[in-house]
Image (cartoon, grey):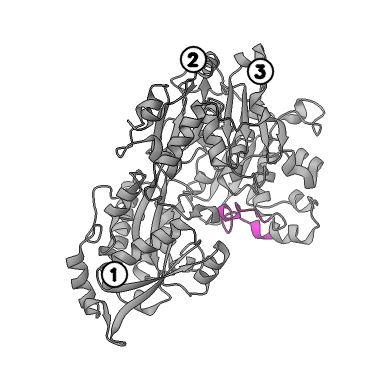
Amino acid sequence: MFFMAETFSKIHVKKVFFPLCLVLFLVGGGFFLFSKSFSHKRNDRENKQKVLRVSIGKRITSLDPALASDSYSQKLVSAIFDTPLQYVYTKKFPVQLECAMLEKMPEFSPDGKKLVLTLRKDLFFHEKPCFPDKKSRKVTAADLRFSILRLADPRLMSGGYFLVRGKIAELDRFRKEAQKSPAGDFTAYKKNYSGLQVLDEYTLQITLTKSDPRFIYALAMPFFSVVSVKSAEYYRGNFADNPVGSGAFRMKEWVKDHRMILEKYPDYRKEYHSGREKGKNLPYLDKVECYFIRQDLAAWLMFLQGKLDYCNLDGEKFDAVADASGNLIPALRKRGIHLLSAPFFEVTYIGFHFGDPRLANNKKLRQAMTLAFDKDFRKESSNGRLMKIYSPIPSGVAGALEKEKGSFGEKDLVQAKKLLAEAGYPGGIDPATGKNLVFTFDQAGGETFFRQTAEMLASDMKKIGVDIVPVFNNRARFFQRLRQNQVQLFRLSWVGDYPDAENFFQLFYSPNAGNCNRAAYSNKLFDAMYEEILEMKDSPERTAKYEKMTRFLMDECPWIFESRPTSFILVHPWVENLFHHDFIFSNWKYLDMDPEKREEGRKNYKPIPMGELRK
């Protein structure tokens, strides 16, 4: 699956409180680290505009939807481009798809292989030199077909290819045709393929190789953003630097590695947001100013002085501004700043690699080590930023057993030692050597966090007589060792691509070993269950099978199910309608703000005394 779905989730043990307190104090005393972009005086007209100012923080890799594989790039892509479907912004779990560019929700044919997409008639690409007039800017089914084919073009090497690989009829033939052509040649796109048929100017029929009820989720992902055939042919190799979408915002300015300014697109399709001002079309904002601030400290200072409108909290900042219960300190609450929190649709795990026969063939050994794992300590060390989990399926989707911990969910050293003896290693002693069992623990980094993580695992396992040897790698070396079966224990996390348990079950399907099945887990019973649910539509019967699969994995212990991270965002009082949603990559079109309240807040800003930070 999508390679960016795998991350290295950080715990962040509690840190010293003083350094950031000092920073907050200095902000109040006039310690400025702001660029000229923020310090210049804005005119009256601009002060009345609704301008959102945010820090992206990371370098943008590409604004080509087919090539934007990281979350930062996809956030901008989702603001500039549009997708056939989208998720309802205010409905998180269970999430719900709705039409975006489509006139009506697509329906599968009786055999589940055909899907007809009918575009709205009010869709226009942003004004660019490649379009002579407004009529030529109209979004058509040919553009949608072209955009899907780009994901499979081997010359582009799109990170979104996994969404269509082996799923759309004759896509392999397109790939062969495209491979024959030089870069920038669109001959292969103009040939006929049975899997993507333009029925009329606004209608595209997709024919799948087999029934796949989850394919519809792909239509709401940034990779499926619709690009213009005309713009791709016009800009060719410079297409990524000249993004031409039909989204809520269009690019006004882009100074690479410094800032990007987006402005409201006046010809954006008619869309209204429930619960807001009736009859007012999205987006509410006039502009979005994105600053690429690489130093977290600088971004943090800008937020505190109202130069940025919201700020994501990492471990150190969180410990300084919130108490052990996750409540914001009074010094910030008095200024109207509020804290948003929500768990990510992500699970972090420690995998047992089945390339090691001892781990693969001895379930009681895996169960014993799982019972020695102290989840409470990790939760406490994270100051509440981690949620304990007991299965590979996040809460909120069918198949998640939110009220069940299973037999191996919580630390139990007595039972762990008993199982270890039954596994053939009483007291952790390997009878073949007469010494304690030893396992390596691989991670993709050697910084303080990774060393602390290794120390915690070693401490847990030492209590049952198992020794852990840390192995610190860079990212490339880490995955190389996984592919070559050179690891025993390792730590990773998986971010769900779409709200379906199947996206997590695939991580245990044996044919996926060496790919997303990083543990190389192999079990014929589980494989049979997985294959059975692949073509099933959402139903009580499928949910029952999902739950059976979840319980099976909870007993098998192919992973130690560690945690689920939580998102924390600090927001100024003038920002309205900001929510966390795992599957909406850019929520800017829904945001609103009060520019007068913003200016008043900045003008009346007062120093934050050190004493207030300690309350």
- What kind of residue is marked 2? Lys
Question: Which of the two residues, 383 or 320, is positioned nearer the viewer here?
Answer: 320
Indicate the position of residue 564 as horizontal and vertical percent values.
Answer: 37, 49
Question: Which of the two residues, 345 or 48, is positioned nearer the viewer here?
Answer: 48
- Report whether 558 appears left or right of 187: left
- What kind of residue is marked 1? Lys
- What kind of residue is marked 3? Arg
* Contact (Cβ within 8 Å) of mark 1 with mark 2: no
Q: Report if residue 104 is visible in the image.
A: no
Q: Quadrant of residue 249?
A: top right
Alpha carbon separation for disc pair 1 and 2? 62 Å
* Image depth: mark 1 or mark 2 in front: 1
Q: Is residue 245 above or below residue 275?
A: below
Indicate the position of residue 42 as horizontal and vertical percent values.
Answer: 66, 18
Q: Residues within 10 Å of mark 2 (few under 14, many from 20)?
A: few
Alpha carbon separation for disc pair 3 and 1? 61 Å
Give the tally of numbered discs.
Answer: 3
Q: Is residue 305 magenta?
A: no
Q: Main secondary structure of the magenta part?
A: loop
Determine which residue is flagged by label 3: 42
Indicate the position of residue 6 as horizontal and vertical percent values.
Answer: 49, 55
Q: Quadrant of residue 519?
A: bottom left
Alpha carbon separation for disc pair 2 and 3? 31 Å
* Disc number for residue 278: 2
